[in-house]
Image (tube, rainbow, N blue to C red):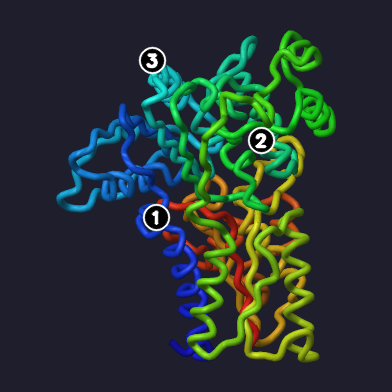
Amino acid sequence: MNPVTHPREFLEHLYDVAVRRALPLHNTAAFLPPPPKGRTLVLGAGKAGGAMAQAVEAFWPPDAALDGLVVTRYQHIPPRPPGLKQRIEVVEAAHPVPDAAGLAATERILALTQGLTKDDLVLCLISGGGSALLTLPAAGLTLEDKQRINKALLHSGANIAEMNCVRKHLSRIKGGRLAQACFPARVVTLTISDVPGDDPSIIASGPTVTDATSCADALSILKRYGIDVPGPVADLLQSGALETPKPGDPAFAGHEIHLIATPQQSLDAAAEAARAAGVAAYILSDEMEGESREVGKVHAALARAVANKGQPFQRPCVILSGGETTVTVRPQPPGVARGRGGRAGEFCLGLAQALQGQPSVYALAADTDGIDGVEDNAGAWVEPNTLSRALEKGLKIDAYLDRNDAYAYFAGLGDLVTTGPTFTNVNDFRAVLVL
């Protein structure tokens, strides 16, 4: 594939390689423990949950007992390979805002931990999205409260560690409480990272991992972003009554946690594919955070320096990055609808605005789960003629940025990246090609 003559196809190929590297079927077998003396129970949550469950079924000894329950996002159960027997139940629920189906599934998951013994094994399959899918409100909170708080967090600009600190302390299953409920059984967690730094205690709010954050931290975050909780719940946080299990808790002795796929691995795979095509590849970081539009501007400045000055890299090259940026949703005047779009789209708006039609620069930004925010696209494209084509159609980029409306802007250009669910999730993927 010639990146000069087919830049879109080249960037799409890099994205596909990155996603393929993170698929559970390619990464699970090496981390499975041997069957225990007693029962093997599989529990899990996340956007990769359905694919992870199928991978376990594919590699678990056929004569060894296996059952359990995993919850994933709507439309995120992959097609079942021919001949693969289903032994783990997979149900669907809402993401990123929890719903009643998620609540019912979580109650069932917690109930399945009853009666476990030290001879039993609990295999926990955890991936990004599990914070919303594994929902069990703390005492004094309703599902409606959790939905409101979750929406407020998503719109606030809080980073993923801050959001999940709050979620842990307002839950009866996250922040290590699921593993605590499994005691005295052995717990082995297989996780796919979708967070900067690959901290298992942050992925899906760490349902099987002890938590170093505190109720005081959660209260501070809520205050910082102006998010209200019911008075009795605030009192429980203030008193420490909603504290999570802490490092050193003996109930977690002997537990194992394995990262089976990470953002860095996917970026490395994409870089290798680029070099195989004769294009130099540079990975900035797999831990990028910050406002999506601002991260887009930084990438634009780097691409312009490469294109115009040959520094810090020589062209042709592709600049890769990952991580989890944020979008602070701006309030709109009465009667003006809030825009649509996610982190990848907003990054592309910021990038295109700052590039100002820079020749020979092409970019793709997409979420590796195939869904940018809550829309049906994975992300968007940026090309040298993005702004000029948009102006011809009356699409003024400043106005779309003001209302966080990346989806409409790129849909109007035919430049949405649409893949459908990928059945994995290692977070943001960004590739900027400078020819």
Location of residue 99 with respect to 25 vertically, above or below: above
- Which of 276/148 is in front? 276
Q: Is residue 332 visible?
A: no
Q: Real-space Cα distance between discs 3 and 1?
A: 29 Å
Quarter-of-image position of residue 164: top right
Q: Residues within 10 Å of mark 2 (few under 14, many from 20)?
A: many
Q: Residues within 10 Å of mark 3 (few under 14, many from 20)?
A: few
Q: Real-space Cα distance between discs 1 and 2?
A: 29 Å
Q: Real-space Cα distance between discs 2 and 3?
A: 29 Å
Q: Earlier in the sequence, mark 1 or mark 2?
A: 1
- Which of 233/116 is in front? 116
Q: Are marks 2 and 3 in contact (CB under 8 Å)?
A: no
Q: Is residue 322 visible?
A: yes
Q: Which mark is residue 164?
A: 2
Residue at screen point 72% across, 33% down: 212
- Side of 104 relative to 281 (left or right): left
Residue 288 coordinates in the image, percent (x, y): 71, 59
Q: Earlier in the sequence, mark 2 or mark 3?
A: 3
The residue beneath circle 3 is: 115
Q: Amino acid at mark 1?
A: Ala
- Side of 230 relative to 21 (left or right): right
Q: Earlier in the sequence, mark 3 or mark 1?
A: 1
Location of residue 69 with respect to 25 vertically, above or below: above
Label 3 residue SS: loop
The residue beneath circle 1 is: 30
Q: Amino acid at mark 3?
A: Gly
Residue 272 coordinates in the image, percent (x, y): 52, 79
